């Protein structure tokens, strides 16, 4: 019975990890903790650098703009492309404050 419990636990963990890793994150609005938890290869220090860059330079327009952040390279971007979304506020539209969510575009 003990081995059956271990097998069940291993299966549960194996299926739970990919579900967590595939969660999408908006790089223009997420805080550092959320970025660190959602993006592979991005710890709290890199996540704080992403937030600091965004606050200093404005929102990211494309996922590739992350490469401008110190410590974020092409491999990190490639590993997280499916998890990243960019949410933009409507400008000049009739619905102020409503945001539009679009997946990050592939190069």
Image: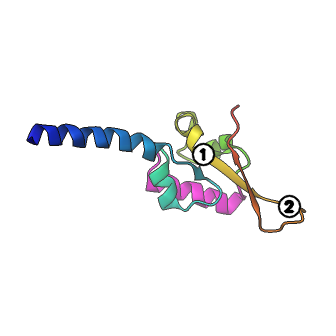
Q: Residue at x 69, y 33 (%)?
A: 106
Name the secondary structure under disc 1: strand
Q: Are marks 1 and 2 in contact (CB under 8 Å)?
A: no
**Left or right position of 44 against 70:** left
Q: Residue at x 47, y 53 (%)?
A: 36
Residue 43 sits inside the magenta stretch: yes
Q: Which residue is denoted by mark 1 in the rendering?
A: 84
Q: Residues within 10 Å of mark 2 (few under 14, many from 20)?
A: few
Q: Residue at x 52, y 35 (%)?
A: 79
In the picture, the quarter occupied by the N terminus is top left
Q: Nearer the viewer, residue 88 or 73?
A: 88
Residue 104 versus residue 29 in the image, above or below: above
Q: Nearer the viewer, residue 83 or 10?
A: 10
Q: Residue 44 placed where, x, y %? A: 45, 56
Q: Residue at x 56, y 34 (%)?
A: 78
Q: Residue 83 placed where, x, y %? A: 56, 43
**Left or right position of 68 against 91:** left
Residue 27 versus residue 2 in the image, above or below: below
Residue reaching furthest to the front: 1
Figure quadrant of residue 52: bottom right
Q: Which residue is denoted by mark 2 in the rendering?
A: 91
Q: Residue 58 placed where, x, y %? A: 72, 59
Q: Which residues are magenta?
A: 40-59
Q: CA distance from mark 1 to mark 2?
A: 22 Å
Q: Residues within 10 Å of mark 1 (few under 14, many from 20)?
A: many
**Left or right position of 13 against 66:** left
């Amino acid at each position: 019975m003990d081995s059956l419990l271990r097998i069940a636990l291993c299966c549960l963990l194996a299926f739970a990890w990919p579900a967590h890793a595939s969660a999408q994150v908006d790089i223009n609005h997420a805080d550092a903790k959320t970025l660190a938890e959602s993006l592979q290869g991005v710890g709290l220090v890199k996540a704080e650098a992403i937030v600091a860059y965004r606050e200093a330079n404005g929102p990211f327009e494309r996922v590739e703009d992350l490469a401008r952040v110190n410590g974020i390279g092409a491999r990190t971007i490639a590993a997280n492309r499916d998890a990243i979304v960019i949410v933009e506020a409507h400008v000049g539209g009739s619905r102020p404050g409503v945001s539009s969510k679009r997946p990050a575009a592939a190069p």
